[in-house]
Amino acid sequence: MKEMEFDEQARQVLQILRQGAFLTTCAAEQTNTMTIGWGYLGWAWRKPVFAVMVRHNRFTHELLEKNGEFTVTLPQEDMSKELAFCGTKSGRNTDKIKACDFSLIPGKTVSVPLIVCKALQYECKVVGKTEMTPAGMEEAQFKQWYDKVPGDYHTFYFGEITASYITQ
Ligand SMILES: Cc1cc2nc3c(=O)[nH]c(=O)nc-3n(C[C@H](O)[C@H](O)[C@H](O)COP(=O)(O)O)c2cc1C
């Protein structure tokens, strides 16, 4: 495990997100992970943040509302099978951690564990959240992303980065 500054691998973070990363949450003793493709590394309220967008219908959304801490694991090795699995199955009816045979390590600064692999790792605490709404959104974009399932918007969760490191 090697510590890194939160922005040290910023370009790689954005590149890996295009293939997918794991957003892990944990509440009521249940740990779950889902694949994310959208995320933001930056500054808000003078804090380093990792922001993620989670639709209301995701089990992850339910867990994040119960415990506002999360981890992001950005794999530097091929995990396409696991990313596809965790991006299509829901933790509501599948134990994805078990099914993917993931090993977990405890968070250093959060109550949520991280997936062990060769990866960039972030530990985050939600310090703000906001809802995506039709107001102010370009109509074509709205139709493309939010028209099919009414009300299934994304919540943007702004997670203050409390630790960032690389695992082998
Ligand atoms: C490549 C990829 C990227 C994804 N990115 C997101 C995302 O950024 N936000 C989101 O809400 N869902 C995203 N999804 C869909 C969720 O991963 C998927 O709905 C998952 O089954 C939700 O799991 P959960 O119900 O256990 O939370 C993505 C799926 C894939 C395959």
Image (cartoon, helix red, strand yellow):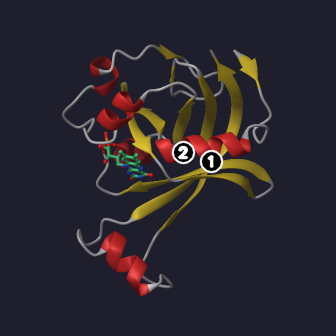
The percent coordinates of residue 12 (x first, y second) are 67, 40
Indicate the quadrant where residue 134 lies.
Answer: bottom left
Residue type at the position of mark 1: Leu
Of residues 24 and 138, the one drawn nearer to the viewer in this rendering = 138
**x 51%, y 85%: residue:** 136
Residues at discs 1 and 2 in contact (Cβ within 8 Å): yes
The percent coordinates of residue 107 (x first, y second) are 59, 23
Specify few, some or many for label 2: CA neighbours under 10 Å numbering under 14, 14-19, or 20 or more.
some
Can you say whether 157 is above or below 124 in the image? below
Of residues 5 and 135, the one drawn nearer to the viewer in this rendering = 5
Specify few, some or many for label 1: CA neighbours under 10 Å numbering under 14, 14-19, or 20 or more.
some
In which quadrant is the C terminus drawn?
A: top right
Residue 153 can be seen in this image? yes
In which quadrant is the N terminus drawn?
A: top right
What's the distance in space between the residues labelled 1 and 2, CA to CA? 5 Å
Can you say whether 67 is above or below 76 in the image? below
Instruction: Name the residue carrying label 1.
Output: 14
The percent coordinates of residue 121 (x first, y second) are 62, 29
Horizontal arrangement in the rendering, residue 74 relative to residue 81 (left or right):
right
Secondary structure at numbered mark 1: helix
Label 1 within 8 A of ligand 1 by Cβ: no
**x 68%, y 23%: residue:** 166
Label 2 within 8 A of ligand 1 by Cβ: no
Horizontal arrangement in the rendering, residue 51 relative to residue 10 (left or right):
left
**x 42%, y 77%: residue:** 141
Residue 28 can be seen in this image? no
Instruction: Name the residue carrying label 2.
Output: 17
The percent coordinates of residue 27 (x first, y second) are 40, 33
Of residues 82 and 56, the one drawn nearer to the viewer in this rendering = 82
Secondary structure at numbered mark 2: helix
